[in-house]
Amino acid sequence: MNLNQKTKVMIMGCGGMLGQAVYNRFSKECTVLATDIDLNESWLQYCDVRNLHSAFELALEFKPDLIINLAALTDLEYCEKNEEDSWLTNGLGQENICLIAKRLNIPVVYISTAGIFDGGKEYYHDFDTPNPLGLYGKSKYYGEIITQSLLDKYFIFRAGWMMGGGPKKDKKFINKIYKQIQSGVKELFVVDDKLGTPTYTVDFADSIFRIVRTDFYGLYNMVCEGSGSRYDVALEFLKCLNLEDQIKVNIVKSDYFRKEYFAPRPLSEKLINLKLRKRDILFMRDWRECLAEYSSVFRMEL
Ligand SMILES: NC(=O)c1ccc[n+]([C@@H]2O[C@H](COP(=O)([O-])OP(=O)(O)OC[C@H]3O[C@@H](n4cnc5c(N)ncnc54)[C@H](OP(=O)(O)O)[C@@H]3O)[C@@H](O)[C@H]2O)c1
């Protein structure tokens, strides 16, 4: 599809860490209606994806050419404790978006996760069979299935360990490490028995933009190149901040955090960008290069 100032793009769940990058990328070239239930920016309008009728009303009024659904509950522990809300947000929310897109005959972008795999293998390509362990993965996998069964024109992009949004919006690993550093700790405790592929929101948003234009609909793994353990990522982050000699990183096993992080997590969530590479539409850089770029936001705050 053409993406230009006349193209209307409706983005749901745009107030989060990925939403910031997607908003920045799309609003430069298209007419964007950015929505969320958390109105943390002046450019956000309220829309709850669990509510089909109000989302429909808003969409009928805006008349989008494309919907990008980023709305999700991404806290794995919250999902385990709030089963119904997880299904309603991650599952029914995406089903609602599909019904709206079907009625308007427009494509949808849905973001899935490496967390739909069980971690029994080290690497997962696009054709591996999902087997989610926890509520988050199960509800996100439902989003994939319902999208594929209801729509012809869809993009499903599976992301890995998201990094982006900076100190204000990043809810994940990098910001959790940063907050500890900021509080003055001289040693960190980080697991080396969880493996994955970091995924930089800026590259991810740019890739969505470029791939949507191709009309090569379908399901894609989309992560940064390279992979590692949480320990590898923490070490690299400290290097980027020039703090590797000042802060010690102790390796621990996941069991160390069993009370805090009780949701089941796969041993490995490493994704391979097999389809993107083969179709020559892989625009994700290596995660170390991305982390170096991303770290500059944190360096300024230290
Ligand atoms: N973060 C990751 O590591 C990761 C990895 C793989 C895939 N993904 C996927 O990437 C997408 C974007 O996630 P993200 O990382 O940007 O997470 P995020 O920062 O939590 O952003 C999601 C946004 O959706 C909002 N939201 C929650 N329930 C909603 C509802 N019912 N209606 C409308 N908006 C709602 C959230 O608001 P609240 O803050 O109030 O909840 C938040 O602003 C999601 O589909 C997620 O599953 C994320």
Image (tube, rainbow, N blue to C red):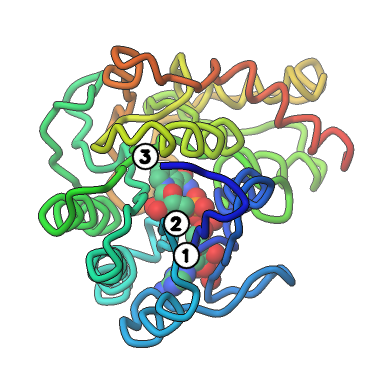
> Residue 122: image x %, image y %?
25, 19
Per the image, label 1 sits on a secondary structure element best described as: strand
Amino acid at circle 3 = Asp
Q: Is residue 216 placed above or below 94 in the rendered structure? A: above
Q: Amino acid at mark 2?
A: Leu
Q: 234 or 59: which is nearer to us?
A: 59
Mark 1: C-beta under 8 Å from nearest atom of ligand 1: yes
Instruction: Report which residue position mark 2 lands on.
Output: 70
Q: Is residue 261 visible?
A: no
Identify the residue shown where x is 55% and y is 18%. Answer: 285
Which residue is found at the position 40% from the left and 20% from the top? 281
Task: Mark 2 and mark 3 in contact? Answer it, CB < 8 Å.
Answer: no
Query: Label 3 vs label 1: CA separation?
Result: 36 Å
Examine the rendering and report whether any part of residue 130 can be seen: yes
Residue occupied by mark 1: 12
Q: What separation in Å lies between label 2 and label 3 (alpha carbons)?
A: 31 Å
**Mark nearer the N terminus (1 vs 2):** 1
Dot 2 lies on which element? loop
Of the pair 170 and 104, the residue shown nearer to us: 104
| Lower position in the chain sequence, tag 2 or tag 3 | 2
**Image quarter in which the C terminus is found:** top right
Rounded to the nearest angstrom, the CA distance separating label 1 from label 2 is 6 Å
Q: Amino acid at mark 1?
A: Met
216 left or right, relative to 184: left
Closest to the observer: 1 or 284?
A: 1
Instruction: Reply above or below: 120 against 167.
Output: above
Q: Tell me residue 145's x, y (percent).
A: 14, 52
User: How many marks overall?
Assistant: 3
- Whole-percent x and y of residue 58? 46, 80
| Pointer 1 with pointer 2, Cβ within 8 A | yes
In the rendered view, tell whether residue 12 sits above or below residue 124: below
